Image (spheres, rainbow, N blue to C red):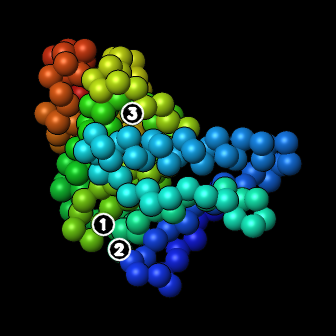
Amino acid sequence: MDLHEDSEQSGAKIVKRFRARATYARFFDKARATREFQGLRKLEARRVRVPHAIEIGREEDGTWVVSLEAIPGALTATAALEAASNKGALLVALAQLLADLHNAGADQSDLHGGNALVDLDGNCYGIDFHGARIRAEGTLGRSTLLRDLSVLAASHREWIRPSERSRFLVAWLRALAPAQRAQIGPRSNFARA
């Protein structure tokens, strides 16, 4: 998979290429590109902040591509967290994105700071959904919710103080839909970070 920015046409776009290195794995390139495109469209319809998927297609060399609307000045969440002196607002925005994904039924199997983008205004966008399962809204179970929360918390442990992790947790819980929040139980179920 490969990203390429194309700004020749009106409005910049990102072209995500799906071409596996191993020949046998190329049989799955179309399926991966299709899942990415459909996942982005479905999440956008469910009001999750994701880049707009413009089109899916195939290049002359057989490479499958998904064109996305570019997000000007965007950084990965990992890069933004590394650079931020005050991480509070960024962590709240990331918590909102995670809750929005959970509320929309997105089981993102490859969740990490590189799969979230932060724009110049501090808004967070989810990316990389070719391996995700998009289920019915509000149907993710407790284990999926807590797994995602744990993975994100562990992936940035060295940059985030315990008080900031607590702020993230509270923001995530508040942003969860009531049915999702009920599966988690009271905040007292969480150990102090």
Relative to residue 40, is residue 49 drawn left or right?
Answer: left
Please tell me which of labels 3 and 2 falls first in the chain.
2
Of residue 138 and residue 34, the one placed in the foreground of this image is: 34
The secondary structure type at the circle numbered 3 is: strand
Q: Can you identify the residue that label 2 sits on?
A: 72
Of residue 58 and residue 135, the one placed in the foreground of this image is: 58
Relative to residue 55, is residue 30 drawn left or right?
Answer: right
Q: Is residue 117 above or below residue 9?
A: above
The part of the image, by quadrant, that contains residue 163 is top left
Q: Position of residue 123 (x, y in %)?
A: 25, 59
Q: Can you identify the residue that label 1 sits on?
A: 119
The secondary structure type at the circle numbered 2 is: loop
Please tell me which of labels 2 and 1 falls first in the chain.
2
The secondary structure type at the circle numbered 1 is: loop
Structural crowding at the residue carrying mark 1, measured as other residues with C-alpha within 10 Å and reported as few (<14), some (14–19) or many (≥20):
some
Of residue 6 and residue 55, the one placed in the foreground of this image is: 55
Using the numbered discs, state the Cα–Cα distance from disc 3 to disc 2 in whole angstroms: 25 Å
Using the numbered discs, state the Cα–Cα distance from disc 3 to disc 1 in whole angstroms: 21 Å
Q: Residue at image x 50%, y 68%?
A: 14
Q: Residue at image x 47%, y 43%?
A: 38
Q: Position of residue 174 (x, y in %)?
A: 13, 33
- Point out the image quarter for the N terminus: bottom right
Q: Is residue 192 visible?
A: yes
Using the numbered discs, state the Cα–Cα distance from disc 2 to disc 1 in whole angstroms: 7 Å
Q: Is residue 158 visible?
A: no
- Point out the image quarter for the C terminus: top left
